[in-house]
Every structure is written in structure tokens, then in C-alpha cells.
Image: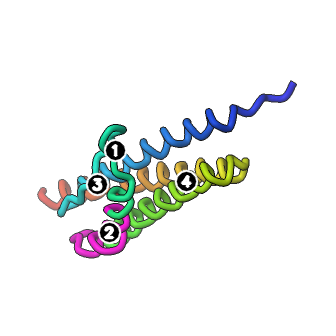
Amino acid sequence: MADELPDPEERMEQLLKALSSAYALASKHLQELPLPIGLPPMEEDAWDLVTAITAMDRARTVLLNEEPIDPMPRDFLRRLLTEWLVAWDLWAFTKIAGPAPWRLEGIELAVRRIIQISGLLDLDIDLDAEDDESSEE
């Protein structure tokens, strides 16, 4: 017997958790910047989606330009934020139009790209730290 796919509603719940984790990753990276950028905390009781999306888009389009960082990590951060916004839009559309397999896969792929970009940002930060240590000697 072939592997059974999870129930679409169960899969949507899993993807919402993945999007929440991706939001936390984005928030972590923005807080680590020389000029920390804060996103509204994602708490179930008090989280305002409109405020969070507006804050993320403002960070993506305006605030990152003011950061004293190299262009590559700035581009990675911009991509990470864009991926989250697109994944969220697709998740919201899926709630309305239904959980077609390609929509669910699209959300999952966007979350995977966020995780990959986050790893690249972590690597870049680690490399910068090594460069700083070697220049002090």
C-alpha cells in the first residue's frame, strides 16, 4: 500500500507551525543586526497579523537599506523576508481556495528556502567573527 498523505487540514496546521518557526528565524536575524530591527512577537493571544506583515515589509523595503552591513547579507535578509511574505500569502490563499497539493508544496518549499537562507546568514556571521578575530592579532 502506498504511503498515505496527511489530512489536508492537518498538513495546513503543520505548515502554520513551520511558518511560525520561520517568522521566529526572521525575527532572530533582524535582532542580530548592528541596528536591531524588531518584529512584533508571534504570540497566539496578541499577535496582530496586519502589524506583523507591515513591519516585515517595512524592514524588507526600508530599514535594511539603513543597516551598515555588506550587500550580500542584506540581500539574503531581503530574500528571507520576501519568502516568508509569499509563503504567508500562499497559506492564506490556501485557507480560502482549498489545500491543493501544489499550494501545500509551495508553502513547504518556501519554508525550506527560508531555512536555507537562514543557514547562509549564520555562516556569513560566523565568517565575519573569524575575520574580526584574525584582524585583531
Q: Which residue lies under the disc numbered 4? A: 92
Q: Amino acid at mark 4?
A: Ala
Mark 4 vs mark 1: which is more N-terminal? 1
Above or below for 19 versus 89: above
Q: Which residue lies under the disc numbered 3? A: 39
**Residue 100, horizontal then vertical, whole percent:** 72, 49
Q: Which callout, 4 or 1, points to the residue nearer the camera? A: 4
Q: Amino acid at mark 3?
A: Leu
Residue 7 placement: quadrant = top right
**Residue 120, horizontal then vertical, whole percent:** 42, 55
Tag of residue 58: 2
**Disc 4 on helix, strand or loop?**
helix
From the viewer's side, name the closer residue of 109 and 107.
Answer: 107
Mark 3 vs mark 2: which is more N-terminal? 3
Tag of residue 42: 1
Residue 72 relative to residue 8: left or right: left
Assign the magenta stretch its main secondary structure: helix
**Disc 2 on helix, strand or loop?**
helix
Determine whether label 4 and label 2 are within 8 Å by CB.
no
The residue at 46%/64% (across/down) is: 82
